[in-house]
Amino acid sequence: MDFDISQAFQKELTCCICLNYLTDPVTIGCGHSFCRPCLCLSWEEAKTSQCPVCRETSKKTDIKSSILVKNLVFLARQHSLCQFLSSEEQMCGTHKETKKMFCEENKSLLCLLCSKSLEHKAHRHCSIECAVEEYREKLLKQMRSLWEKIQENQRNLNEECRIINLWMDYLCLRREMIRDEYRKLHPVLYREEKEHLQGLKSESKKIFQQLKKSRAIMVQKRKHLREMHEELLNLCHKPDVELLQNLGDTLTRSESLLQLHMPQPVNPALGARPITGLIDRFNQFQVNISLNYEISSHNIMLFEDVRSLRLRHDPQEAHLPSETSKYFATWGAQSFTSGKHYWEIDVDSSWDWAVGVCKDTWLRKNGPVVESGDTFLLIYVKEDNCSHLLTTSPLLSQYIEKPLGKVGVFVDFKTGSVSFSNVAKSSLIWRYPACSFSYPVRPLFCTGHT
């Protein structure tokens, strides 16, 4: 009867994925418990968060550490360890006593008398039970850190692959935009246009090679991290005595791996190549704009929306700032309904900023900025250790160097297009396709910081 109870007890403390004692046990929404690393790997491979037992879907945020199960597993492991140490094969051959001490120096099990001998007297000792608990906690802590690095590297790899997929499309759009801009200027600039496009081709090729090299480094990093995680997981399922004797070297190697630099996604940026006569052409239509100033961080969640949309491709890992940004939103006192208009905005001292135009009626609706389709903005946001330049309607990354000083905004009602220029470099940042709008628009400028 006692044997049946013991077997039933052991079964309840066994992970149904690895069929070993639960390691770092967690319980999900349906109530079933698993090893944390086993569950994470299972969900990652299946690309779904279903319970491996009952198939009920759980949220990843529903994972809870199970202290009760952890304590029960600890007691079960201790019982198994005591049975193992009490066996005749594990008795001290010299003193015929049970081995109770663990020598940190040479990773050996000793009886109490051996631990006080001349050979081991100067070494650090502790009880085998304490050593097992300490080593297992070290192992679990290392596995959690390693898994976090695996996830971080995967996010970086996903971002790099996303940039690579967008890169060629962006270059095609940019080449066509540059050609079209030169057609509006004097034919004598044919040689400059040719050099401009050739320089763009050469620079973009180098950046593309950097992107591919970065992706290859991340793939290799993923391989090394996963191999080490698998090695630690296998060691975690070993008997306690084997864990004590083999953890040291494995832990040292895993710590060395964690201390290495994590490869970060390349933030590609083409140089701002000048176009002769670009700013002179825009200046023919220069206007003075009067701006209405209003603190609107409670009404217009512009920069938060941009960061949220950038992270949407990996929503499980998205971590947005907890504080709302404080910034000024300014817009023109007068709207434009026809003709051509050009003005410049100084953005040099701004942390986050956005310049452009919005539909006149959008201000009264006070709706979402980025996804509204009624705003044509060039946006600069800082995020972690890098920055991003984007345009709205639709949200599109602009892989070109950040403008310093003034940004020019050119609105052409005849073609229904908006252009942004780097004034200091006489360079075109972006021009919307023709027929992008056919309604009154109003200048808009936002700036601020978190």
Image (cartoon, helix red, strand yellow):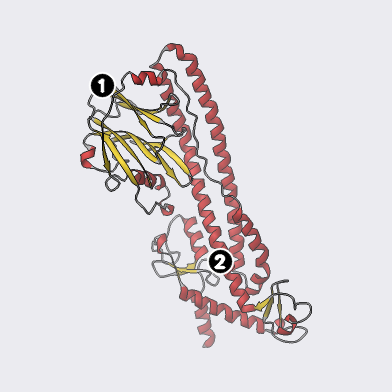
Q: Residue at x 61, y 77 (%)?
A: 130
Q: Secondary structure at mark 1?
A: loop
Nearer-the-camera pick, 204 or 276: 276
Q: Residue at x 25, y 34 (%)?
A: 359
Nearer-the-camera pick, 178 or 401: 401
> Does residue 394 appear in the picture of this structure?
no
> Does residue 88 appear in the picture of this structure?
yes
Relative image position of residue 248 (x, y in whole percent): 66, 66
Question: Residue beneath label 1, please?
Answer: 339
Relative image position of residue 402 (x, y in whole percent): 45, 34
User: Where 144 sits versus 308, above or below?
Assistant: below
Which mark is drawn over residue 148? none
Nearer-the-camera pick, 36 or 194: 194
Q: Residue at x 70, y 81 (%)?
A: 90
Q: Secondary structure at mark 2?
A: helix
Question: Residue beneath label 2, please?
Answer: 140
Would residue 400 appear left or right of 231 to someone viewing this image? left
Relative image position of residue 272 (x, y in whole percent): 47, 28
Gap between marks 2 and 1 measured at Cα: 67 Å
Would residue 416 appear left or right of 33 to someone viewing this image? left
> Crowding at label 1, few (<14), some or many (≥20) Cα neighbours within 10 Å?
few
User: Where 383 sits versus 100, above or below?
Assistant: above
User: Where 376 sits versus 9, above or below?
Assistant: above
On the image, which quarter does residue 244 sit in? Answer: bottom right
Earlier residue among tags 2 and 1? 2
Relative image position of residue 46 (x, y in whole percent): 47, 56
Q: Residue at x 50, y 80 (%)?
A: 9
Three-letter residue code for mark 1: Gly
How many numbered badges does the structure rendering display?
2
Would residue 244 appear left or right of 446 to someone viewing this image? right
